[in-house]
Image: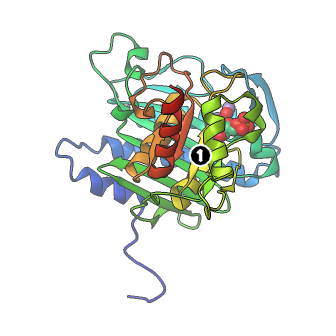
Amino acid sequence: MSEHFSTDIKTLTRYILETQKHHPTASGDLTILMSAIQVGCKFVESCVRKASLVNLVGLAGNVNVQGEEQKKLDELSNDMFINALRASGKVKTMVSEEIDNVIICEGDGKYCVTFDPLDGSSNIDAGVNVGTIFGIFKHNKDSKTPEDDYKVPGSDIIIAGYCMYGSSCNLVIAIGEGQVDGFTLDPSLGEFILTHPSIRMPSRGKIYSANEGNSLYWDEATRKYIDSVKYPQTPGTKPYVARYIGSMVADVHRTLLYGGIFAYPSDTKSKDGKLRILYEGFPMAYICEQAGGKATTGLKRVLDLVPKDVHARCPIFLGSKEDVEDVEKTFAIYE
Ligand code: AHG
Ligand code: MN
Ligand code: MN
Ligand code: MN
């Protein structure tokens, strides 16, 4: 075997096939579904890579259900994922950040998919990392309405993942049983290759990540916690380092690898916070927990929430287990 080239590469598709081996009922449906998600991610990656060259930056001229001005890439990536997932034939319904209602698919797909096709889109025009976030749930045959499939706790999630479009294209996936793995797109092959096997989050970090431009509007508990890492009371303890990119995928990816805490708290401007439960909170909380971290609203485990509607939001503090436990202890004082 050549000492330069591996001829036994673990692609994402091979990885999913191998994990399916452990599920006797597996029919290959998840492999096909994940292939559709990979196509979407590769398409968005290619668009992001050349956005400024082909005039894909800037606004599309529409406002989405969130009240946000949609970027061209918001719409393009949204259309791509909807078409790829629908064509897979494995999806019963979908929820996208960019579409008001639940998207119904023909046929008898077994899965429900939630996704944020382009996360961090305010950063697109500046060439800063953006991403895609997705969660896969089982369709419940007892659901009376399409919405019923999404009124479930995040702990029902089967697979969660994100793809970050940055200096390289990194896809991180959590498939359950404490398994979180990272893949890097090899553009010459067009395949995601396993590069970060068995990601484990440090039990405590030294970085905090929050938009302090909102601190005027934070509640007392949030302010108390953030101050505790900025002005540590224990003699000899150094303050945490501040890092905030403004794309959830990038801030969470750094937190997953380096440890620490990422927070998007609620505030007087947005009482439930900004991040959406189904396609930002749940997938990222699941990935964090599977990697040994935690995710809380301050008062409740994020994965125990049951969203009232498909675009419901929640406050979120996620990251290293001990750091999140410090948040929970602080909030318990103010409960
Ligand atoms: P999206 O681009 O999908 O609408 O998500 C943006 C989110 C998330 O990526 C990030 O953590 C947060 O918005 C940043 O919000 P602020 O600019 O208010 O800090
Ligand atoms: Mn948005
Ligand atoms: Mn987002
Ligand atoms: Mn988005």
Give the residue furthest to the top: 144
| Observer-nearest of 256 and 115 | 256
Decide: is 171 above or below 272.
below
| Observer-nearest of 196 and 90 | 196
Give the x, y percent position of residue 29: 31, 41
Q: Quadrant of residue 254?
A: bottom right
Give the x, y percent position of residue 57: 80, 42
Residue 105 appears in the picture as rendered: yes
User: Residue shown at 38%/15% (left/top)?
Assistant: 148
User: Residue shown at 42%/60% (left/top)?
Assistant: 200
Give the residue furthest to the left: 24
Q: Residues within 10 Å of mark 1 (few under 14, many from 20)?
A: many
View quadrant of ligand 1: top right
Quadrant occupied by the N terminus: bottom left
User: Residue shown at 37%/35% (left/top)?
Assistant: 157
Decide: is 75 above or below 52.
above
Query: In the rendered structure, which amino acid carries the disc numbered 1?
Result: Phe
Q: Is residue 90 left or right of residue 226?
A: left
SS under mark 1: strand
Give the residue furthest to the front: 235
Coloring basis for residues:
rainbow
Residue 115 appears in the picture as rendered: no
Q: Quadrant of residue 246?
A: top right
Give the x, y percent position of residue 131: 62, 46
Q: Is residue 316 left or right of residue 291?
A: right
User: Residue shown at 42%/79% (left/top)?
Assistant: 6
Q: Quadrant of residue 210?
A: top right
Q: Which residue is mark 1?
A: 262
Decide: is 274 above or below 285.
above
Give the x, y percent position of residue 151: 40, 19
Q: Is mark 1 within 8 Å of ligand 1?
A: no
Decide: is 257 above or below 211.
below
